[in-house]
Amino acid sequence: GAGVSQSPSNKVTEKGKDVELRCDPISGHTALYWYRQSLGQGLEFLIYFQGNSAPDKSGLPSDRFSAERTGGSVSTLTIQRTQQEDSAVYLCASSLTSGIANTGELFFGEGSRLTVL
Amino acid sequence: AQSVAQPEDQVNVAEGNPLTVKCTYSVSGNPYLFWYVQYPNRGLQFLLKYITGDNLVKGSYGFEAEFNKSQTSFHLKKPSALVSDSALYFCAVRDLVNDMRFGAGTRLTVKP
């Protein structure tokens, strides 16, 4: 597709269940980011993938959160044993890099809204 | 690590008046600075960026921003605000190789 695609757009789950959120970045974009946005608030960095390098996981809030990126394209963010405080919009973004210079702007998906009951 | 501060949670202006949304940054090395806008229930959209060159950069929808190295600032401006500019605005920074970090956001309200 032309833009970053995220699914599902909305997910309601019960406390303690596992959820998977998917991000399909723009074709050719080597950098992929996950952010979390609580209601009307700022963006909390979660994880960053750049090409074949080891991901920067420094923003993941707990070991219940994990993410992978297969084949340098699609990424899945997994939240295990969900808690009510995990409720938020999870935003994925991708960008184009040139060599070592990472000057490209991010292109965001519409987000996945997670509600944990 | 790189960081961004947006000192104002809320900015209110009257339609037709100039607007400024403030941003200051901290980064080791040369900064790459960005502004994004978020309309209700939507993802973020890129407005403009500073990488190098002219300190005044122009972007989408008539917005511009001025890079000031001595004050480590990158304030967003528009000469004449529109009601349709009302949204949440985010400043962001990265350095050469690290990830992009965002400010807390500033809610702009333009009143008719």
Image: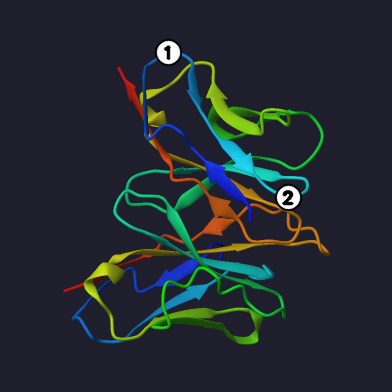
Colouring:
rainbow
Amino acid type, residue under disc 1 in the picture? Gly
Q: Quadrant of residue B25?
A: top right
The residue to which callout 2 is attached is: B28
Chain ID for label 2? B
Observer-nearest of B80 and B34: B34
Q: Quadrant of residue A77?
A: bottom left
Q: Residue B100, image x and y in percent?
A: 61, 56
Q: Residues within 10 Å of mark 2 (few under 14, many from 20)?
A: few
Q: Residue A67, image x and y in percent?
A: 50, 81
Q: Residue B91, image x and y in percent?
A: 54, 42
Residue at 25% from the left image edge and 87% from the top image edge: A17
**Is residue B28 among the parts visible in the rendering?**
yes
**Is residue B63 among the parts visible in the rendering?**
no
Residue at 33% from the left image edge and 57% from the top image edge: A38
Observer-nearest of A87 and A22: A87
Image quarter where the N terminus of chain A lies is: bottom right
Residue at 55% from the left image edge and 79% from the top image edge: A74
Observer-nearest of B99 and B14: B99
The residue to which callout 1 is attached is: B16
